[in-house]
Image (tube, helix red, strand yellow):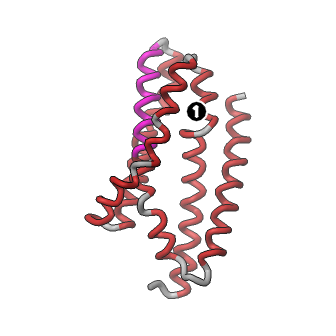
Amino acid sequence: MLRPEQRAIAQRRFHLFMLFNVCSFQCLSGNVITLFGLRIGLSNLLLGILFSVIPLAQVMPIVGRLFITRIGNVRSMVLFWSGRYIMAAPLLAVALLVSNGKHVAAVVVLFIGVLGFNLMRGIGMAGMQPLIGYVTTTEDRGHFMSRMQLIIHAMIMTTGLLMSLVLN
């Protein structure tokens, strides 16, 4: 059980984590990836296939529970949230590959990156609720969750607006 000052620090850090979490999710699993796919010339079929991998994240917490029992909540989340970003990093090269005429390579990198990102995200999600339980008490959990929802929705709007300006 955390002392009140430790809990306040942990909650602030968790909310900061959520800022980055929502931003990355919006960029790699939302409308932005569709717009980007269209921009680089993906066909409707390829866009459909790309989006078919995103729901895989919803079943992956089953796998995540296995890791939690072996390495713990925090280590599991750190491992798989880090893995998420490692899988997403090659996506930065997609636009360069397209501009150099390597369209097939760009599509492969895009698919692997989005698939890997979402698989890592799904596995890591298993640790989210227990971690929320650890950084809150029964009395402050509602306030914490409300604040988290405000952060999530504000970041969804902000990311969408920024990406619309970038992708114009």
Q: Which sits in the foreground, 5 or 140?
A: 140
Q: Amino acid at mark 1?
A: Ile
Horizontal relation, residue 9 to residue 134: left or right = right
Can you give x and y, in whole percent of width and height, for residue 3 in the image?
50, 87
Which residue is at 59% across, 65% downward?
A: 15
Q: Secondary structure at mark 1?
A: helix
The residues colored magenta run 102-119
Rendered location of residue 130, percent (x, y) = 45, 69
**Quadrant including the N terminus:** bottom left
Q: Is residue 40 above or below residue 141?
A: above
Residue corresponding to mark 1 = 33
The location of residue 5, given as percent across then percent down, is 55, 85
* Residue drawn at x 48%, y 26% as measured from the top left: 49
In the image, residue 41 lies in the stretch drawn in magenta: no
Image quadrant where residue 90 sits: top left
Most frequent secondary structure within the magenta stretch = helix
Relative depth, front residue between 131 and 24: 131
User: Which picture quadrant has residue 66?
Assistant: bottom left
The one of 130 and 100 positioned closer to us in this rendering:
130
Indicate whether 16 appears above or below 55: below
Splitting the image into 4 quarters, where does residue 125 fall? bottom left
